[in-house]
Amino acid sequence: MKVIRSVLLGTAAGFAALTAAQAADLPVKAKAVEYVKVCSLYGAGFYYIPGTDTCIRIGGAVRIATTFNGTTYGVPFYQGGTGGANSYNRNYFTNRERFNLFMDTRTQTEYGVVRTYASILFDYTQGRENISGGFVENDFLFIQFAGFTFGKAVSQFDPQWTLSRPWIGSTGFFSGSFNATGIPQLAYTAEFGNGVSATLSLEDAQPYRSAGVVNTSLTGANALLGPFGAATTGYGTSANTFQGNAQAGDHVPDIVANLRLDQAWGSLHVAAAAHEVHGTYYTPTSSDSGKPDSTWGFAVTGAFELKNLPTGLGDSLKVEATFANGAAKYTFGGTWDSSGAGRLAKIGDGGLAFGYILDGVYGTGTGIEKSNAWDVSAFYEHYWTPAWRTSVFGSYSHISYGSGGNSLLLAAANAGRLSTGNTNATGSFDLGVAQVGTRTAWSPVKDLTLALEFSYTRLDQHLEGTFTSTGTAIPGYAAGSQFQLKDQNLYTGSAQILRSF
């Protein structure tokens, strides 16, 4: 029995080993591979993130640009400095290289689409950074959910086509409230169907929307910035940090509302904004000296866009007009004053034109005299062929301070309370800026564009008399140099190559 039992156990063990070996030879079902799938819900370029129902698009661009007789991206030399002084030591050309990277995610939910968006720039500007320097710029960072927008996005005051202006490369071209890097906001948009929508928004006014307020009675370190005084280093880190600006602190967000119509033929846009204006103590270091009451300014705008005009497929026309009281940056928008700090100044042919873009002015013991500013601008782009297109554009922007504000500014200028000199002048501090330009672009292949641009700017100032410098702040001119106050012309060109993906 022992022998039989051993044989049976051995046979069973052999069969078990054989079965295990055969099982090991059988093919094992592989784990499913999750391939990236195209998401067609939101247009070209979106894909599902594997394992989720979230669609994502990642893209960007590399932009190489050179400006001739101006600062970066076509900004004319109208902000003082060596360029505004027409100094031999100015930059005859300026280069900038940029890499833009954006991410756009969208998810369908029971509350509608949840969207996150981020746009980041890696920037290098010749003469500003060292040979391997540069900086990172966060242009747009926002979340959209159930009609709400939270974060840094295009201002609800602006026509949405200001987000991308392919018909113009210059950020020094005044065209109303153009804000290239977005404004922090809390907004709600209601959709009424057929392309009609309305938005109510609270937007952080600093530093984009605050043009600054000046106490014209002050001297020394608190004096009004002169035509060629140096702008404060770190401009933009707080509300227009230039010498003489008395509007410190971020008190109240701007209240913005718009009504829009978007159709295949184009769009209509109307908007309004309320903007708080305040100064500081009459003697900045003494709260006992009193201060002017804060006040409210406002701005209104209207714009329309016409697409696919009879002149050609892809042709478009855009027109905008804005008026602002105590809210000057709604008409003189954009990033143009990052070095000039609210001041325009240009020397040429022995003459000098200068003026200020301010929300208001006051003197010791007075209230705030608010500015009035307005602009009109138009852009037309024509496609000669699918690869060639030309745009023409023009604008006129104007600012005035009324009889009270002008008296304060003129008294300060004639009394030597400018940081770099004084005037012997009559007239007013009204200032107009007329600009026209043209741009031709060629796209030899998809998403690659080469462009040339030319613009003309005229500073139309309304002062008569002279300005005499009291120091060597004007590059290339000795202390005591005198200039006739008269209008100035500026000519600027630029070349750019852009690769998008």
Image: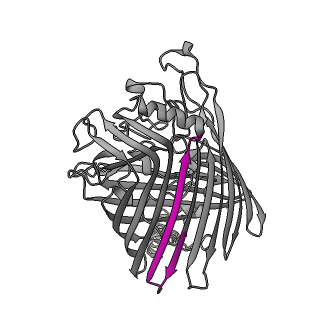
Is residue 314 in sight in this rendering? Answer: yes
Q: Position of residue 197 (x, y in %)?
A: 73, 61
Q: Is 442 placed above or below 60 here?
A: below
Nearest the eye: 476 or 168: 476
Q: Position of residue 483 (x, y in %)?
A: 32, 44
Q: How many marks?
A: 0
> Which residue is farthest top?
288
82 sits left or right of 401 in the view: left
> Which residue is farthest right?
192
Q: Position of residue 318 (x, y in %)?
A: 59, 69
Nearest the eye: 58 or 84: 84
Scheme of image coloration: one colour
Is residue 344 in sight in this rendering? Answer: no
Nearest the eye: 372 or 379: 372
Q: Is 116 placed above or below 449 here?
A: above
Residue at 64 percent across and 26 percent down: it is: 293
Q: Is 265 placed above or below 459 here?
A: below
Residue 449 highlighted magenta (yes or no): no
Nearest the eye: 470 or 13: 470
Residue 382 highlighted magenta (yes or no): yes
Residue at 45 percent across and 71 percent down: it is: 24
The residues colored magenta run: 379-402
Q: Position of residue 118 (x, y in %)?
A: 51, 55
Please tell me whether the stretch drawn in magenta is mainly helix, strand or loop: strand
User: Where, quadrant-wise, is the C terminus in this rendering?
Assistant: bottom left
